[in-house]
Image (cartoon, rainbow, N blue to C red):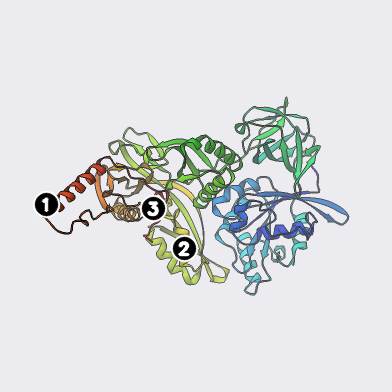
Amino acid sequence: MSNPRIRNFSIIAHIDHGKSTLADRMLLRTGVISPREFHEQMLDDMDLERERGITIKAHTIQLPYDVDGETYLLNLIDTPGHVDFSYEVSRSLAACEGTLLLADATQGMEAQTLANAYLALEANLEIVPVVSKVDLPAADPEGVAEEFIQFLGCAREEILFVSAKTGHGVEEVMRALVDRVPPPAGSLDADPRALIYDAVYDDYRGVIAYVRMVDGELRVSDEVVMLATGRRYEIGELGVFGKGPVPRRALAAGEVGYLIASIKSLSDVRVGDTVTRAKTTVEPLPGYRQPQPMVYCGLYPSATENFESLRRALDRLALNDSSFTFQPESSAALGFGFRCGFLGLLHMEIVQERLERESDLDLVQTAPNVTYRVVRTDGELVEVHCPAEVPEPTAICEFHEPVARLQVLTPHETIGAVMSLAEERRAEYKGIEYLHGGTRALLTYEVAFAEIVFDFYDKLKSATRGYGTMDYELVAYRPADLVKVDILVHGQAVDALSMILRRGEAPARARRVLVRLQREIPRHLFQVALQAAINGKVIARENIRPLSKNVTAKCYGGDITRKRKLLERQKAGKRRMKSIGSVEVPQKAFLAVLGREDS
């Protein structure tokens, strides 16, 4: 049996329901940090996390907690709340035996609260329900407690009430972790097995693997093997997470810590892999289900000589964020770059910002799109990650689009607005469930993923006055009448601006895009034609008027033929410029296809 005084747990909740604040209060209570060192979001060490006020990466720390003269080690993993980072949550839960499920006393259980709770139930974790922010004037802790009872089937006395801001109830929460979360079940006597649940790259020390010891013990100087890659290394340092890294001579079953073994090759470490001592035979741990990217876009260096720098930066980021994927591609308009896959638009935005900040790169991003499937006339099924991959029209038998199950949690007075918004996106109504005594409703739809991935969340927040929340999951690919729309600038197709749209809405959507491009592309000395075409047939056109110069201004009289001569010369020059001139499309024009409405 592993150490019975270890408790591995995570904190899961919807965005802004108090996860990081409760973690901060636990750090103070256990003395890991002093009041003098304390600041908000102690575990959120990325600049982006502090600026946005959200958790992006799961963070781990060990909290020593004394109960009745015995010291328990509470290994806390603070997790993100946004739906785009749900893969971070699922990986963190695989390293735990229990979890604190938080719900804001003023807002109740939200869509992502339910989604994270399902992840914890699937992982067979002990769930400790906690009602947070009970000190707020608008708090309704008893109403939220009823939601917990209705959803989890728990008893009223199992629910804890806490205000992390004032410290009320924090002691009860920590005592509940000791009493209700089971200790790790691994065996100290078995051959060592450690699960890699995260990793980061250090310029001086190589890959640092974050591990959860499941069985046995690993010691410094042990030779270990990564079962998935077969690579062997000698352990140079082991440790646990305190206020900073705390080196240890060994890690035993049940503990969570880090492993450094001078691993220089990023491809040798995979999140979800099993680490064991060399020359032992063990069954690999189940690891993690590979995430399915939902949104793809192209990332290109603004200067072509930075291509290799971008590749190295993507390698490092993919090590630290295993839900992010990339592969090389080339574009006639942008040169060499990478086709990148993300779990959602916020994930995409965060990755781009991290690349620009951490690696000092200037990037050009193409318009994002979802993954489609095409059945070719020869029966082959191919995945299409970008419009450039769409086969020739004569080779397409059928287009399939991804369909998501969408759950929207909203106050009862805005149900009509949510239904209208869903109807606009051609969502198929599946059902409604009332919560919190009928004051809130959970609406379920099935909808084409492309209809909700770009701006649906913003529209939902507006329609529900900020109180609506949503969660979604991909359920199937279904046939749809889709076409590839090419955008031509000055007669040249710009592959980075191509789109895949429903045939019926293609002309109207294409015209809106051209109008926005017309505003974003600067005027030239010659007329620039903007066109949208399907299979070579133009369906919409806009023109960018040329800059004009009054060449006859100096003619104040005399023969009219003098003016005509100057005008003809100007006309001939414009024709020559139009035939050899090139049009530069600025970065913001590439995002012109993002918005549904013309702002």
Q: Quadrant of the C terminus?
A: bottom left
Instruction: Describe the element under mark 3 as helix, strand or loop.
Output: loop
* Mark sitting earlier along the chain (3/1): 1
Q: Nearer the viewer, mark 3 or mark 2?
A: 3
**What residue sits right under mark 2 in the picture?**
460
Q: Nearer the viewer, residue 219 or 348?
A: 348
* Front disc: 3 or 1: 1
- Mark 1 residue type: Thr
Q: Residue beneath label 3, please? A: 592
Q: CA distance from mark 3 to mark 2?
A: 21 Å
For marks 1 and 2, the one nearer the N-term is 2
Q: Is residue 428 visible?
A: yes
Residue at the disc numbered 1: 561
**Looking at the image, residue 280 lies above or below residue 375:** above
The residue at 32%/56% (across/down) is 515
The N terminus appears in which quarter of the rendering? top right
Marks 1 and 2, how far apart at CA: 64 Å
Which residue type carries mark 2?
Leu
Visible in this render: residue 161? Answer: no
Counting from the top left corner in percent of width and height, residue 420 is at 40, 65
Give the image location of residue 135, x and y in percent. 68, 71
Classed neighbour count for the residue bearing mark 3: other residues with Cα under 10 Å, few (<14), some (14–19), many (≥20): many
Left/right of residue 252 with respect to residue 593 in the rendered view:
right
Q: Is there a contact, CB below 8 Å, between mark 3 and mark 1?
A: no
Placement of 508 over or under 260, stated as above or below: below
Q: Please report whichever mark, 3 or 2, sits nearer to the chain's N-terminal start.
A: 2
